[in-house]
Image (cartoon, rainbow, N blue to C red):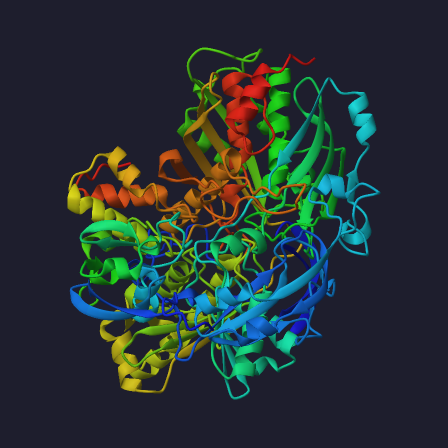
Amino acid sequence: MPKIVKQKIEFEGRVEEREVVLEGDDVPIWAADQPFRVVGTPVPRVDGGERASGAAQYTADLYPAGLVFGAVLRSPHAHARIRRLDTSRAERADGVRAVLSHLNLKGIPWYNGLSALFDTELRYAGEEVAAVFADTAAAARDALDLIDVEYEVLAHVVDPEAALAKDAPKVHASGNVLGGDAERYARGDVEAGFGGAAATVELRAETQDVLHHSMETHGSVCEWTGDRLTIWDSTQHIFGVRRQVAAALKVPLDHVRVVSRFMGGGFGSKNQAAKYTVLAAVAARRLGRPVKIMFTRAEESIAAGKRPRSAQRIRLAAGRDGGLVAIDYWGVSGLGAYRAVGSPLAGPAKEMYACPNVRTEVWNVFTNTGPSAAFRAPGFVEGTVALDCAMDALADRLGIDPLELRLRNYAEADQVLGRPYSSKFLREAYTMAAEAAGWSRRAPTPAAPVRSGGPRRGFGMASQIWGGAGSPPAYAEVRLNPDGTVDVRIGTQDIGTGARTALTQIAAEVLTLPVEKITVRLGDTDFPYSPLSAGSQTIASCGPAVRMAAEEARRHLLDTAASVLEAAPSDIRLESGGLSVAGVPDRKIGVHELTGRMGNFTIAGRGFRGANPDGVTIRTWGVQIAEVEVDPETGEVRAIKITACHDVGRVINPMGYVSQIHGGVIQGLGMALCEDHVTDAESGTVMDLGFDSYAMPRQSMIPEIEALAVGRPDPVSNNLGVKGVGEPPIIPTPAAIANAVANAVGVRVTSLPITPAKILRALQAPPSS
Amino acid sequence: MSSVSASPDAPHAVTVTVNGRAETLRVPARRSLLHALREDLHLTGTKEGCGVGTCGACTVLLDGRPVLACLVLAVQAAGRAIETIESLSRDGALAPVQESFVRHDALQCGFCTPGQIMALEGLLRRTPRPSDAMLRRAMEGNVCRCGTQLRVQAAARDLAGERRSR
């Protein structure tokens, strides 16, 4: 019988106590020395052909018959009130079928009640004012110009530190600080720690607003059949979209189906339903036609979410041997105009390194800018820039090798929750990365800024801590077809991570069938529930459910074979798709022969994700080493090589693992050196409206990347021994690059992006103490 | 609406060869080749990443050379030959360039992939054995947010027959 227990669950850098329903016993965890046939081997993605041939249909590719196109009018002001709105000219325009605005669409609260789907107070330049629906996308966009709006422009604030000031313009009537106050944490006695320290360092770190810029923009296609709604959505969370849209429209859950078979990237920006989905659903119902809204690239730049900028101050105190005695951390993160949760900026400072006295304070602040969203390891990328650059400065101060300093401050247990880690193979990762990167070639950081001469090499490193344990609930179904092929159904998403392939490998392993015999169907709320594809949790949450479902099917297969082969089920062996009786090799039957003989009597299995182990903290770990070349005359930085080694438990698909490392490192490289989403403080409007002005890494700036995995399974995390790999590889990259730049030219730039101008300014600055 | 005959939405008849087939389109002058391919001919393998010529996702071959379909008007393609990603695979079998992308995992979400593949195909037709620098330069205009750049290099090198191991 199912029972409910309380568990501490980590998600996106935060720990919450949640109720977990336990249905029964999990299958035993795979042993560390378990022999595998498919798991742990590189398998090219099973849907690669569909994607490479252009056959894969993304939401953007759907043009159902009778389609109506929506376009959104957005606020030109960072903060304004709508005094008067007249949509009548737009309604009369050629091809226009409907216009929605606050005049005819009321009563849909949004952003946890802070606002409405159409609010009359607009809190960022880009907020939705009205939506036009027309027979062509061009007609819909043309008609936006025919909407007459009179705005009362209000005072705005775009910088989170400025928004903290007492006299700052109020983004929300309830105030600019999320929750009304800072989030604080303390252990030990920080002042006493600083009092007795042999060395202290202090630095300020600033990280910029960073855009996700998924190649497929945000968008939905909605179609009603009677009172049933189907939504095709470019989303990381089909079940979340179903829940939110059903609630907004006040329709039952079973009347809403959400489909996302292929989606073109999200990185955290597509974790929930958004206004366009509800607008398309409302218009589709009113018009009796399918409706599509896809963002333009410019809309993607102003209203699709961002990693919000941060400002941080960190002080470290250490003994002569480099052992940390105190960490004092203060940080401010933006939220944009709307966000329900803050950035866990202080996560690394609290937990990465062993330290008895720690104090952290984090302010999450609303501004009149586009809403922020989770972005691949939210808060931890930013927090690692402050912490690991400070560690590097401390190493230089004490004349200790930065790697040695990290080893001396190795945290053996979770100092925040006061309990052991399920496993931690970070020492192994340090050793593997140092050897692969040639860390021994690192020269000491120059004592004075290097202002001239040719390009200089530098090495820098940074550590990584993150969750990625996954959790229940997640469910899967496995069915064997009469021809011996297998359908796996699971309501998760493959957002480009290769989840479909890894889940295929798990089912293939248990059923001893080739990968080609398995089809994993996902991205449909008609399939069993799975959580959002975020928090590095997909394989850790869904993989164990697929394994359990496959194990149940396997048991039924063995039982059925036992009656056909007239033997005890315990004597039946399943190997390479064949069933035989132990010790009697000629009493055998192939899986496909058995299922064929059964016809449509179906062998099936159902699986669920078991609970996480009690009393331990599950973390992913890693280290990256950057080798860069800095030209002190121009300030230009060229990344030469990034060596990454992460401990993410058992690796199901080493090929997918390496691709995830590449993705994280390359996004981290962009954040370190070139990406900058700029909002003009005076006008409150966005300056970069696409790839011409928002610089993302392209071929010419990609360094060599060596992706290593410790590869040791976690002994208790779940029945696969896996942890997640989606987010860990972006976390240390910017800090490692910043440290390598400092090692090259002797000045420390901790304001991202590290542009040539900032390096030259730092090199030319008069020497400080 | 006005009765001026030069309405931007007045259709023009345009005959183009798409993937070896003659097609007659009736398109307004402002309709891009990209939208004509996707919406009029239902060839949705060619993707729109930006619509303004900055990302390469809509790369197709026009008379054998790679172009950005969002920057070509459908009417400009009159009388010319267009090849899209759909032309490469035959009867469900992938072309070597596509197979190489899959084998090297040179795609993640896959949204930029058709454009990447057509850009590479265009390069290799002109220059069957390009240098590494030429490969990178030819692919510089293809934005990938997932971070497949090194995998794309490997797929391209393999295809170029150099088969260097990393």
Q: In the depicted view, which residue is nearer to us: B98 or A546?
A: B98
- Asked whether, in this view, residue A193 is left or right of residue A739, the answer is right
Instruction: Work out whether residue A252 or residue A301 is closer to the camera in this orientation and state it.
Output: A301
Residue A588 location (% of width, % of height): 25, 75
List x then y, in percent, for residue A530: 53, 67
Q: Position of residue A101 (x, y in %)?
A: 64, 71
Instruction: Give the vertical position of A669 relative to A571 (above or below).
Output: above
Residue displayed at 64% across by 17% down: A397
> Would residue A562 appear left or right of A116 to someone viewing this image?
left
Along the viewing direction, whichever of A695 and A575 lies nearer the viewer: A695
Q: Position of residue B52 (x, y in %)?
A: 41, 51
Q: Is residue B56 visible?
A: yes
Displayed quadrant of residue A278: bottom right
A543 sits to left or right of A409: left
On screen, residue A220 above or below A709: below
At a point 15% along the width and 42% down the height, the residue shown is: B128
For the point 40% across and 30% down, which residue is it? A436
Q: Nearer the viewer, residue A292 or A356?
A: A292
**Residue A582 appears in the figure:** no
Picture layout, residue A403 above or below residue A615: above
